[in-house]
Image (cartoon, rainbow, N blue to C red):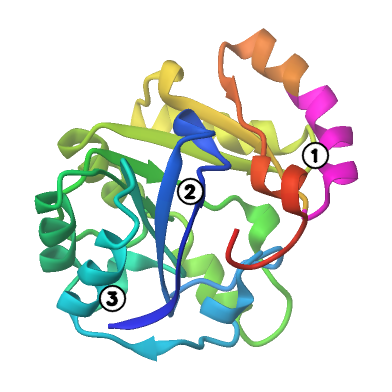
């Protein structure tokens, strides 16, 4: 499996924000988000080929209570089902971060699904592919039916909420599992967007997520 990085940090987003976690970041993605913060796993995939046993051994070195399998898009990684079962056997709580476009049978404690809105669509040669793949309601419903989940939306402007509501109506999501997160790769942008996004969350009953790792360390890898 091609792995971009394995590192120990804190969870910066979602319902487990602040939890000490080992991150296993697969390389390779079927989408090309315009604001992607890990282009080294999508636009320019890089990394090293590791066996599943090598991945599990590296994760075990940290003895962390939480493990996060992320990407790229981990659901397209060969052997992802077996890897998740091996990671779960280690005893840690396992979160999988996915865009929810490809379904795989996996083992996990929290399916962190981030459906991509039209604000993610790039210009150029990848536009048509990205737009065709970014929203797969049947896949979302399968994940939501089979796993404990959170739906995490990246919001760039208030107008994005109309699309969020269309997605939620279409998949019949529990509002208590909906998390909104401001788009941005620096603390100032996140703070500015977070102010008005907090008011939306108060009005709609959704949760607001920071990007705590950006607040603490900026736009850096391995944190």
Q: Residue at x 83, y 52 (%)?
A: 186
Residue 30, how many percent across, how many down? 44, 75
Quarter of the image with the N terminus is: bottom left
Residue 23 can be seen in this image:
yes
Residue 61, how many percent across, how many down? 30, 62
The disc placed on residue 200 is none
Is 172 drawn above or below residue 20 in the view shown?
above
- Residue receiving disc 1: 157
Q: Quadrant of residue 87?
A: bottom left
- The residue range painted magenta reads 185-197
The disc placed on residue 115 is 2
Report the Cα–Cα distance between label 3 and label 1.
32 Å
First-in-chain label (2 vs 1):
2
Label 3, secondary structure: give it: loop
- Residue receiving disc 3: 77
Q: Residue at x 32, y 34 (%)?
A: 149
Label 2, secondary structure: give it: loop
């Amino acid at each position: 499996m091609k792995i971009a990085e394995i590192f120990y940090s804190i969870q910066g987003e979602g319902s487990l924000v602040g939890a000490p976690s080992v991150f296993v970041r697969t390389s390779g993605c079927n989408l090309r988000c315009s604001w992607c913060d890990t282009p080294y796993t999508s636009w320019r995939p890089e990394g090293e080929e590791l066996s599943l046993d090598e991945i599990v051994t590296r994760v075990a070195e940290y003895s962390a209570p939480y493990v996060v399998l992320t990407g790229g898009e981990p659901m397209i990684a060969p052997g992802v089902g077996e890897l998740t079962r091996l990671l779960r056997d280690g005893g840690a709580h396992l979160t999988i971060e996915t865009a929810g476009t490809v379904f795989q049978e996996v083992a996990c404690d929290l399916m962190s699904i981030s459906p991509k809105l039209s604000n993610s669509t790039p210009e150029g040669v990848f536009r048509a592919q990205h737009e065709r793949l970014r929203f797969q309601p049947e896949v979302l419903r399968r994940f939501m039916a089979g796993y404990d989940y959170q739906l995490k939306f990246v919001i760039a402007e208030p107008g994005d909420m109309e699309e969020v509501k269309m997605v939620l109506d279409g998949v019949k999501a529990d509002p208590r599992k909906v998390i909104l997160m401001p788009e941005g790769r620096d603390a100032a942008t996140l703070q500015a967007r977070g102010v008005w996004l907090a008011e939306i969350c108060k009005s709609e009953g959704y949760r607001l997520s920071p990007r705590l790792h950006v607040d603490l360390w900026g736009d850096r890898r391995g944190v």
